Amino acid sequence: MKAEEKAQSRVQCENTSMKNQVKSLQASVEMLEEHLAGTSRMFEKKKRKLNVLYIIADDLRPTLGCYSDPVVKSPNIDQLASKSTVFYNTFAQQAVCGPSRTSFLTSRRPDTTRLYDFNSYWRVSAGNYTTLPQYFKSNGYTTLSVGKVFHPGIASNHTDDYPYSWSVPPYHPASFSYEKRKVCKNKDGTLHSNLLCPVNVSEMPLRTLPDLENAAEAISLLKAMKATESPFFLAVGFYKPHIPFRIPEEYLKLYPVENMTLAPDPDVPKKLPEVAYNPWTDIRKREDVQALNVSFPYGPIPKDFQLRIRQHYFAAVSYVDAQVGKILQTLDDLDLAKNTIVVFTSDHGWSLGEHGEWAKYSNFDVATRVPLIVYAPGVTSALPRPGGKTFSYVNVLENSQEQFAK
């Protein structure tokens, strides 16, 4: 078999890896406007530009119905996918929040941004790069950030890169300050800082949760932007399914623990180099995990607790899906869906017991592979499923630009 044929047989759908995002997003927007202008009067040159709604989940692997996951219930994201271009093999540059987010928001790889952790700001340590939202801002867009978009702290200069990237200071939900506090109620009524933390929202401090606040703020901003003539770039960063799994308790009912199964490949690979494995230090900080007295570094975690971790992760995904649904419904209600590009993605995945891992940080595909869904009004719904080509994920919409042009 020729080398070209071998390569083609290996690639069944898009295999994305990230490159040159700002330039391609501009090209995609211009191309979409040109295409739609020829088929609909609503996008004549004097009309407003296409908006962008950019939704980012945290630690979300492609456990979604639209990615053929047999367990997870994600009706709202699936509905978006039904009229979008869905990329099935999208891989983050690095399975760590800060480096990955900086990479796809600056269109540069970690070896260029010089960020492999959370401890430097690229404008100081690497270069004064134009970010994706910054480019839109410089071209007349109102740019807005809700929740976790850039990684907070040093990695974004403690400002989420404001005022460079955003027209107004980014929004962060007040209830996030309770994320690591003792708010998880055990069966005896005592409060702890647990990994598994299903809650009654009415009993929470401020009687809400961060992603509920994020969805409400995004909806409020959409309503405000509807009343203006300014095109907008709205980025919404949800905190889940990142640990701890502090989520409304009702979502667990979607996933009875007796229906859960263990990871199909739960063993640590033989002769795995130590540098290639992460001993899930993040979850070991939680009180319920500490109570298990799991040996370091490889465990294993008791099987009944493994099932509950998987149950809570899936429930957290459905919780995020519900918030996405609220925002997309508002987009429809405000008649904004017809002129708004929607992107749904994540910064990286998370291991759910595969290879003995309960973490991100590794280079296994469960930690690096992410969902990528791109909706372009009037265009993507008519597209066939792309196949057999390799695309780059440094630039999110570059991957679909060829499809838009057809």
Image: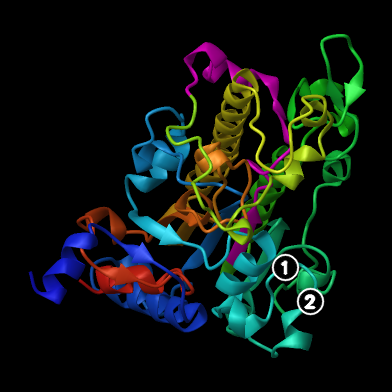
Indicate the position of residue 63 as horizontal and vertical percent values: 46, 39
Is residue 347 visible in the rendered image? The answer is no
Q: Are marks 2 and 1 in contact (CB under 8 Å)?
A: yes
Q: Secondary structure at mark 2?
A: loop
Q: Position of residue 46 (x, y in %)?
A: 43, 79
Query: In the rendered image, which quarter contains the N terminus?
Result: bottom left
Query: Residue sitting at 59 percent across and 67 percent down?
Result: 232
Write the start and end of the magenta stretch as one range.
233-261
Q: Is residue 291 left or right of residue 318?
A: right
Reply yes or no: does residue 239 show up in magenta. yes
Which residue is more in the foreground, 338 or 138?
138
- Residue 307 in percent (x, y) is at 57, 23
Name the quadrant containing residue 357. Answer: top right
Nearer-the-camera pick, 45 or 151: 151
Which quarter of the picture shows residue 264?
top left
Q: Is residue 178 left or right of residue 281?
A: right
Residue 58 falls left or right of residue 345: right
**Picture residue at 51% right of the left edge, 80% below the top:** 22
Furthest residue to the left? 1
Residue 120: mark: 2
SS type, badge 1: loop
According to the image, label 1 marks what residue?
A: 117
Residue 80 drawn above or below residue 2: above
Locate residue 162: give its quadrant.
bottom right
* Residue found at x 76% / y 74%: 161
Q: Residues within 10 Å of mark 2 (few under 14, many from 20)?
A: many
What's the residue type where badge 1 is placed?
A: Asp
**How far is mark 2 from mark 1, CA to CA?**
8 Å
